Each structure stands twice: as structure tokens, then as C-alpha cells.
Image (spheres, rainbow, N blue to C red):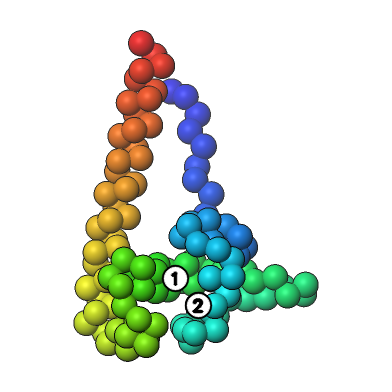
Amino acid sequence: MPYKEKEIERLYYPIGEVAKMFRVSVSHIRFWEKEFAILKPKKNKKGNRLFTKQDVENLKKIYHLVKEKGYTLEGAKRALRDKDAVEEFSDSIQNKDQLISTLKKVKAFLEQTRQEL
């Protein structure tokens, strides 16, 4: 049985990586940080922003509301305060994340099978 490397869980993500995750600019992430109180990234001694997993989850919610649903910033702020909207979003994001994860595993399996042939 081949050795499988365990996926590494990171505690903090630098702002550049977070921006790449969402395919937006770094300044966009900084702007959202100013606009939305739920975003509280840690800062190191140099002042670099370090986002936790919870910050990334909050950014997913903001991105979904603003970019995918077309909410204004004020509308997104209101929706984030509304628990029903947040729960609905969380369920849809979890389903989407699970689907993506499953598809990545299937793709890896198919690629491995192809190489073995």
C-alpha cells in the first residue's frame, strides 16, 4: 500500500493566499476587513494580516452574498446579522464544499488509474 501524505491543516493563512482562494485582489480583502466587523484577522509584529479558518469561513459568507448573490455591502451586512440567512448559506456552502472534495477525490483516483494503465 503506497504512503499517502496527510493533508496539512493550517492555523493561519496570509492575505495573499486568502485573496487567491477567492480570486480577488489583496486590497479587496483589506476593504472587506474594514467594512465587515466579523472579519478580525490577527496581525504579526510586522503588521501582516493572518487569517484563521474562521476568518476564511466568514469571507466565504461575504463573498457568497456580495459576488454570487449580488447583495450590496449594506445588504450583506444585514443578511449576516440575520441568522436564517446565515444558516441557509452555511448549509449550501457545506454541500458545495463536500461536492468539490468528493470530485477532487474521484479525479485523483481516475488520474492514478490512468497512470497505472
Percent coordinates x, y for residue 89 in the rendering: 27, 71
In the displayed structure, 112 sits above or below 9; it is above
* Identity of the residue drawn at 24% across and 67% down: 91
- Disc tally is 2
* Identity of the residue drawn at 29% across and 43% down: 102
Q: Earlier in the sequence, mark 2 or mark 1?
A: 2
Give residue 74's mark: none
Q: Residue furthest top?
A: 117
Report how far apart the C-alphas of labels 2 and 1 lie in the structure: 8 Å
Nearest the eye: 117 or 32: 32
Give residue 32's mark: 2
**Residue annotated with mark 1:** 59
State which quarter of the image contains the C terminus.
top left
Percent coordinates x, y for residue 105 in the rendering: 34, 38
Percent coordinates x, y for residue 15 in the rendering: 60, 65
Nearest the eye: 41 or 27: 27
Camera-near label (2 vs 1) is 2
Tell me the SS state at disc 2.
helix
- The answer to whether marks 2 and 1 mark residues whose Cβ atoms lie closer than 8 Å is yes
Q: Amino acid at mark 2?
A: Trp
State which quarter of the image contains the N terminus.
top left
